[in-house]
Amino acid sequence: MHNPGTAIPDRFPAEERFAEGAQYIAGRLTRGTSGRTHAVVDPASGEEVLRYELAGTADVDRAVAAAREAFPGWAGTTPGERSDALHRFAAVLADRAEDFARAESLQCGKPLKLSREFDVPGTIDNTAFFAGAARLLQGQSAGEYSGDHTSYIRREPIGVVGSVAPWNYPLQMAAWKVLPAIAAGNTIVLKPAELTPLTSLLFAQAATDAGIPDGVINIVTGTGREAGEHLVGHPDVAMTSFTGSTAVGKRVAEIATATVKRLHLELGGKAPFVVFDDADLEAAAHGAVAGALINTGQDCTAATRAYVQRPLYDAFVERTAALMETVRLGDPFAVGTDLGPLISHVQRDRVAGFVDRARAYARVVTGGEAPGGELAKGAYYRPTLIADAAQDSEVVQSEIFGPVLVVLPFDTDDEGIALANDTPYGLAASAWSRDVYRANRATREIKAGCVWVNDHIPIISEMPHGGYKSSGCGKDMSAYSFEEYTQIKHVMFDNTAVAAKDWHRTVFGDR
């Protein structure tokens, strides 16, 4: 394998940890067989961290076979046994929290403090939540709805789940997909993004060390076109869960439909941030900066479109720009860093393209450039505020996925809510007002899976995450997510031992 140099292993020794390969099948690391390699690159420095063999279709087949073989045994465990295993899993994750935080920051470029305080604790909390949820695989007691018959409902696991996760929150996305699936008794094959496989592999290893049987969790690290599409279309995969762009989500749905799989999609977002004229301006400006720049804006729930009622518009633009200018870009492992790089130079150039094209029709108030000096080696881009764009413009309608916030004015409450709903997306939104009736109206009428009031971005394990419209279908986290990984069976008993004869007589007469 490639020697990445001397500085990076001090942060996380990826070459040493994954010397046996970057596929995790039936409880062990192994090499991919596609005949091609891929590099994990530190986006802050451009240095190669790990070069590994990509998974091919044969590796996907092996992983699915391992999951299929493990399914009867795992599905046959009691909810209490699965719960105990997940509690042990949470304890292992907690013991290795620093390893996970460093690996996540290294492969993604996010500040270490974000990984330590958000990504890793959130993943441990998710694991503990689903450890409890595993005990609630409840059906429904029913009664005699049809004469001499008793009916009841069973909730059962589906089988092998094939999941595809994105690169922006690789650890949390692995958890969101794996945990509800296995808590319900399914087994899973997860394909992480090829840019960011490290924490998904560590996650699977931690599960094995916690006593979760081999084959219950499998990781195949390959390209979407080869490994991903083969996994989604595999005839032995009963359910597909995908998180990523809406365009790719449509392709996933097309492939999954051919084998009539259960489908779970968490797709793109373009979250509106609606500020009414009675809002706390200072709170809203701080909320906009935090909501827009979380994970360098690479978050499908990030605040991207701020609609500000005209009396507050100019002051909001001025204050938000001033706050953005105080954000410190730097080494993700440095204590004072607020904002790390984008995932790659390709993504940075894509974001810069949106901003550069916007100069022809809008005002770039602050930012709008990559920094120089030492940071020029990485995929950095300055926090950017764009004002006065038209509602139908590219920066308002398209998902940029970078540290860019667009601000537009509105006059009436009706107009503000209509503008908030005027994109194909509906994942998340926020409304800012001191008036409870005004805020409540916004939560009712904004079409999004989550609407925050006087805040933007926090999530909790107990509540669902998922979108409306082109932002997908299905929920992550919460009991709603748990139920998505089950199928419902109606069981009906003849209580008299003669009902079938009576039914036969009714249909066919006396014979």
Image: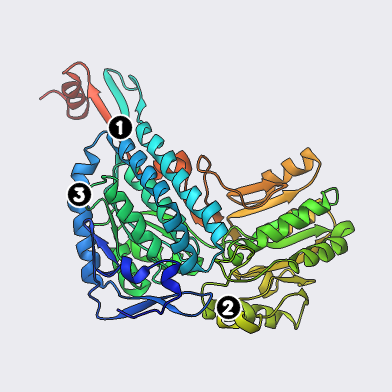
Q: CA separation, marks 3 and 2?
A: 42 Å
Question: What residue is disc 1 on?
Answer: 80
- Provide the secondary structure element on which disc 1 rests: helix
| Mark positioned earlier in the residue sequence (2 or 1) | 1
* Residue 402 vertical placement versus 422 (above, below): below
Place of residue 155 in the rendered image (x, y in percent of width and height, measured from the top left):
32, 36
Give the side of residue 337 with respect to residue 164, left or right.
Answer: right
Q: Residue at x 66, y 62 (%)?
A: 292
- Provide the secondary structure element on which disc 3 rests: helix
Callout 3–callout 2 Cβ contact below 8 Å: no
| Mark positioned earlier in the residue sequence (3 or 2) | 3
Callout 2–callout 1 Cβ contact below 8 Å: no
Categorize mark 1 by other alpha carbons within 10 Å: few (<14), some (14-19), many (20+). some
Callout 1–callout 3 Cβ contact below 8 Å: no
* Residue 372 vertical placement versus 277 (above, below): below
Categorize mark 3 by other alpha carbons within 10 Å: few (<14), some (14-19), many (20+). many
Question: What residue is disc 3 on?
Answer: 70
Rendered-image quadrant of the C terminus? top left
Three-letter code, disc 3: Ala
Place of residue 92 in the rendered image (x, y in percent of width and height, measured from the top left):
36, 47
Question: What label does residue 47 carry, if any?
Answer: none
Place of residue 436 in the rendered image (x, y in percent of width and height, measured from the top left):
77, 38
